[in-house]
Amino acid sequence: MIENWERSKELLARARLSLAGGVSSPFRAAAPVPLYFEDGCGPRLRDVDGNEYIDYQLAWGPMILGYKHPKLVEAMLRQAELPFSYGAQHELEIAVAERIQRLVPCAERVAFTSSGSEAVQLAQRLARAFTGRNLILKFEGHYHGWMDSALLSHHPAASEVGPLESPHVIPGSAGQVPNAILNTVVAPWNRLDLLERILKAKGDRVAAVFMEPVLCNSGCILPSSGYLEGVRDLCLHHGALLVFDEVITGFRMGLGGAQSHYGVTPDLATFGKAVAGGAPLSVIAGRREILEQMYGGGVSFGARSMGIPSLWRPPTQHSKSSHAMTGQPSSKQIESAVC
């Protein structure tokens, strides 16, 4: 049993003098002590005290290829000598969007963001603009990021949840504005009968039904047989959009995500940093007419795609061949960068 975390404790004491809480996320302030790592390869991590671990957290999800995957390292090295951001267009954006279109059933159009939370915010705005409605329906236990409009009824206390057929909307943090709950409706997961009842009462005001197609953030609960199909039908009946939060299921249940696995196509879907092997790139994909609202339809959006260099593809015939222009690493560079 590992009992030596002295160096991690020393670093934590030092970090508390500069970093709020001594860590970069409250989720990391656990374990026997907050662990500080110095390296990782494949499914394993090594901390600063020399302890090795099999990593089941995958950096909270994004590292689905493991650490220092040779192809990912090669892609990063190829791009290292190029600008990491242009503030303009480049061909790799198109290539990545085209690949996502081929893989994800709902992806008539694609837009890039930096995080899953950011993608969810954009999906909410697009849904409201498209339908002219304000309410977002989400399910108890489902997590869609830490923003005010999303961190609601994620893990409420049992004393707060209210009746099963009409759950209360519970903020998840101090400092959330009270009116965040006014634009949200909460439903219990996997109860199609209760969802039908809620939509019958409020469906004409619901812009979108948001869900994790598999409830990964609260126990990994699969949808009941026919549930996703039933929700799809209810959304169509009430004129609400169906949005799959595939930040966790995307590229894990299959390259096409849960929507491909279950054969149920949402109107919009969000994907997290797993799309770039952990680099800061996330995606919203969906119907053309919904996403094109950002270009002439009045929906404002600030794009970011910092993680695209990790999705390198070979230079085209028009690319320069010099190392300076392509960032082409030597085989020795690649070998020294991987396990």
Image (cartoon, rainbow, N blue to C red):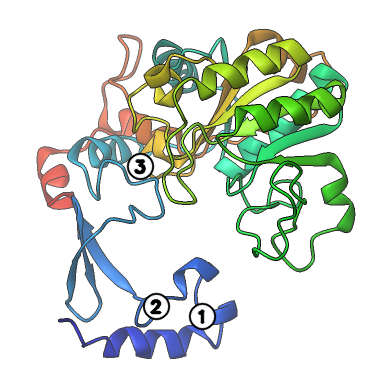
> Residue drawn at (42%, 34%), measured in percent from left and top?
249
At 82% from the left and 18% from the top, the residue drawn is 131
Residue at 64%, 63% in the rendered image: 158
Of the residues shown, which amino acid type is indicated by label 1?
Gly
- Closer mark to the observer between disc 2 and disc 1: 2
Label 3, residues with CA under 10 Å away: few <14, some 14-19, many ≥20: some
Label 3: state its secondary structure. loop
Residue 266 visible in the current orientation: no
Q: Earlier in the sequence, mark 2 or mark 3?
A: 2
- Give whichever of 194, 112 is nearer the camera: 194
Image check: 281 left or right of 210? left
Between the C-alphas of marks 2 and 1, the distance is: 9 Å
Say few, some or many: other residues with alpha carbon within 10 Å of mark 1 (under 14 / 14 to 19 / 20 or more). Answer: some
User: Tag 2: residue type?
Assistant: Pro
User: What residue is shown with label 2?
Assistant: 34
Residue that numbered label 1 is attached to: 22
- Mark 3 = which residue? 80
Secondary element at tag 1: helix
Q: Nearer the viewer, mark 2 or mark 3?
A: 2
Relative to 38, 20 lies left or right = right
Residue placed most toward the observer, 274 or 220:
220
